Amino acid sequence: MQQDVVIVGGGVMGASAAWWLTRLAPGLRVTVIERDSSHARAATALSVASIRQQFTNPVNVQISRFGLEMIRDFPACTGGPDLCLRENGYLFLAGSVASAEVMREAAAMQRGLGAATELLAPEALAARFPWLALEDVMLGSFGAAGEGWFDNMGLLAGFRDGARAQGASWRHGAVVELLREGGPATGVRLADGATVEAGAVVLAAGTGVAALLQAVGEPWPVEVRKRTVFLIDAPEARHPEAPLLVDHTGFYLRPDGRHWIAATVPDHDPPADPGDFAPRLEEFEDLLWPRLWARAPGFAAAKVLRAWAGHYDFNTLDQNAILGPHPAVPGLHVMSGFSGHGLQQAPAMGRGLAELLLTGRFQTLDLSALGVTRILAGTPFPEHAVV
Ligand SMILES: Cc1cc2nc3c(=O)[nH]c(=O)nc-3n(C[C@H](O)[C@H](O)[C@H](O)COP(=O)(O)OP(=O)(O)OC[C@H]3O[C@@H](n4cnc5c(N)ncnc54)[C@H](O)[C@@H]3O)c2cc1C
């Protein structure tokens, strides 16, 4: 049956878009096509599921503030599950005068937009987080409210189940081709040869978007970047109220129940094979643990309980989301390039995309600077606080 909108990819972005479309336009015919309902390799499932307002680009602060509202109140907003948001905050550390200055400017901007960012000098940091070694730290930036972590799969399930209840349908299949009759997108073809025709096509396929856009012929600066996440037991480090620490030496750490989750950005970070989900186990001993132990002596005894690898859809132009119509193909829309901070953005991205499709423009939060035009022009709209 002809659809109004077909969405490729049933991760958090596709599910949020389907929820918002059917919420704002009851009766709209929306089909989501997902190739793997286990979500085993979806970034949504492999994420560390955290939300912050400490971004350098004001639009990302606004996007996360809207995400926070929904995540805090998800059952009332969607009928979905309680996402158990744990608001322990994020703590960014700066190790140089220059980065402390950037931190000050960002904090002022964030506070101006309603965030609860506090700047903490080393003495204040030591008083608040006595388990940290701070000799090399110039300044800390702490989100005292509205930042923390939550149930990632609950967010996906709430949007998906809510969208279905509102009339959207999910279909199993791998999309292999965009259908274009004389130019505009008119639907998609699946690997089994079936086609789904629609008035609009939304690519929300995570790292799969670039492959689907190849036929369009325009450059798409989004690469697969592998990130290995470690679940750690550190019996002498019990700080359940600890924030998510983003350390200037190149790692992040947060509590996860009785344990800890930590990851680092490898010094060498080339594009990864889309099928390569093998964790880089050596990163723990070579990079992560020495940095972690130097920052927090309580991690002297630390054992890796589990490790997994996930893929960022890394926007090499400006590490920012790409949302909206593709100027080269009428009827084609993209949700791509989230560069490791897309989970928290899903509520606002889905709403923005639905507004654009239904009314031709953003109605609530203006996300037009995140559009495809800047990508094709090679004009960055950067986010610098990429974790
Ligand atoms: C290790 C890690 C940690 C992260 N931590 C955070 C965090 O703390 N906070 C945060 O906000 N974000 C975080 N992120 C980023 C966040 O998880 C992603 O930005 C977000 O989940 C992207 O959602 P998506 O729906 O675009 O992609 P995905 O979740 O990858 O979903 C895309 C879906 O499309 C399907 N698909 C692909 N190609 C096709 C095709 N051709 N046909 C049909 N289906 C297709 C896939 O099977 C997949 O299910 C992290 C990511 C990783 C990898």
Image: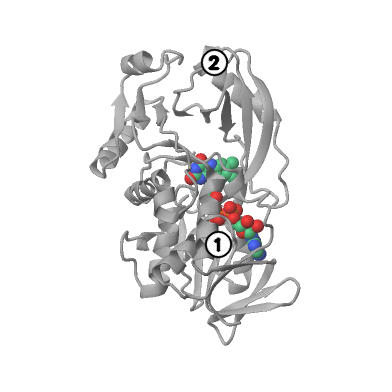
Local packing at callout 2 (Cα closer than 10 Å; few below 14, some 14-19, many 20+) is some
Ligand 1 within 8 Å of the CB at mark 1: yes
**Looking at the image, is mark 2 or mark 1 earlier in the sequence?**
1
Residue occupying image coordinates x 50% and y 56%: 159
Q: Where does label 1 land, which residue?
A: 204
Residue 159 visible at all: yes
Query: Does residue 365 sit above or below 86 in this rendering?
Result: below
Q: Where does label 2 land, which residue?
A: 237
Q: Position of residue 255 (x, y in %)?
A: 52, 27
Q: Is residue 30 left or right of residue 77?
A: right
Query: Does residue 252 sit above or below 301 in this rendering?
Result: below
Query: Does residue 173 sit above or below 198 in this rendering?
Result: above
Q: Position of residue 326 (x, y in %)?
A: 48, 71
Q: Give the structural element (helix, strand or loop) at label 2.
A: loop
The colour style of the image is: one colour
In three-dimensional space, the C-alpha distance between marks 2 and 1, rounded to whole angstroms, equals 40 Å
Residue lying at the far bottom of the rendered structure: 182
Local packing at callout 1 (Cα closer than 10 Å; few below 14, some 14-19, many 20+) is many
Residue 277, quarter of the rendered image:
top right
The amino acid on which the numbered mark 2 sits, given as a three-letter code, is Ala
Q: Give the structural element (helix, strand or loop) at label 1.
A: loop
Residue occupying image coordinates x 46% and y 74%: 327
